[in-house]
Amino acid sequence: MNAISPGGPFSCDVLIIGAGPGGLEAAIYLRRFQRSVIIVDKGHSRLSLIPVTHNYGGFPDGIPGHQLQQRLHDQLARYDTYVTSGEVTRLVEDDDGFIADFNDTRVSARMVILATGVADAGLPIENWREAVRSGAVRLCPVCDGCDVLDRKIAVITSPANPVGHAVFMRTFSADVTLFEREETVPLDAEQRIRLQQAGVRYVQAPVKGVGMTCQMTPVLHTADGAEYHVEVLYPMLGESARSELAAALGAQTEAACGELLVDEYQRTSVAGLYAVGDVVKGLNQISVAMGQGAVAATNIHANLPSHWRAPVAAAGEETAHAASG
């Protein structure tokens, strides 16, 4: 289906909200299952920020996030389906499934897949998007720790996992420093011992801001007036799931950051509402999101009313039918 214009109401088998890797993969599967799909995205996918990913198989030299995103769009276009730009602001249940509103447009769908991702928490970082795209600021140690071997690495504490990320980065570099985020919550004795055992330096004065040099390397400014120059920064910002639409319908979420709880088929606790990707509780990875998209799409197809394809008439039959008419 082409990207839709304002108006409606439009109807489809499945509405997909979010066009990151999970949402796009689900759309490709559903179109191959001959299901009608509308996919709406407001353009904030973190995939586009990734300089190069080496964690997604089949690309030995890696692939930039925006290129992978474009390849998925191109593949979806082969099934005459395109992403509509917009933000779904209202999602409600009705007798036939769901009704969604966006861009002065209304869509009714039998089932819905949420692929809305997460929003990163704030921290004053100069030239944020450029820093991420250059690889100077990185968001996921699991994704790209191997890409920064033997670099001078800074990690800022995460409230949920104060020392774990810094210790994990010792897998990849002998030069790792952990910086505090808040004055009021310094590490306890057991956490400090864990850092010492791993050979991680600890700076207790909290980070107040991060600048970037002309060479796009981070400079951390701490509350005591000191500056620390590093090559790579993992700010471990923390995040909140963009799960408000599902939560408003009563879907169960994980308390800490609102991630959606799903079953083995990516079904939320709301009948007909599925979720894939970073908005779901679990490991935030491109390959995981795409696998979840495949699982959700396959289960949706199995649970929608059967959609039989009409027989294709032979050329001779078509001619005879035309003559008799």
Image (cartoon, rainbow, N blue to C red):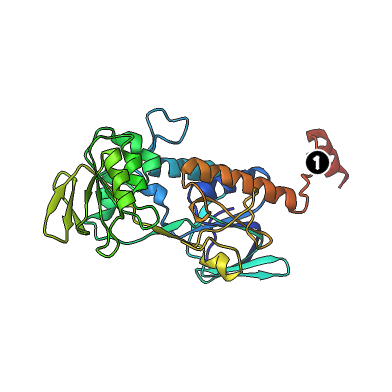
Would residue 84 be found to the left or right of residue 233 on screen? right
- Residue 85 x %, y %: 47, 59
Would residue 220 be found to the left or right of residue 51 on screen? left
Would residue 223 be found to the left or right of residue 91 on screen? left
Q: Nearer the viewer, residue 19 or 146?
A: 146
Position of 82 relative to 52 (above/below):
below
- Residue 229 x %, y %: 15, 46
Residue shown at 64%/42% (left/top)?
32
- Residue that extends furthest to the top in the rendered view of this protein: 60
Q: Residues within 10 Å of mark 1 (few under 14, many from 20)?
A: few
Q: What kind of element bears circle 1?
A: loop
- Residue 186 x %, y %: 28, 58
Determine if residue 249 is in view.
Answer: yes
Determine if residue 52 is in view.
Answer: no
Residue shown at 21%/39% (left/top)?
152
Position of 37 relative to 255 (above/below):
above
- Residue that extends furthest to the right in the rendered view of this protein: 324
- Residue that extends furthest to the front in the rendered view of this protein: 189
Q: Nearer the viewer, residue 255 or 87?
A: 255
Q: How many marks?
A: 1
Residue shown at 56%/50% (left/top)?
81
Residue shown at 53%/54% (left/top)?
280
Position of 244 relative to 226 (above/below):
below
Q: Which residue is mark 1?
A: 311
Q: Nearer the viewer, residue 147 or 98?
A: 147
- Residue 53 x %, y %: 39, 38
Question: At label 1, which amino acid type do we have?
Answer: Pro
Would residue 212 be found to the left or right of residue 318 on screen? left
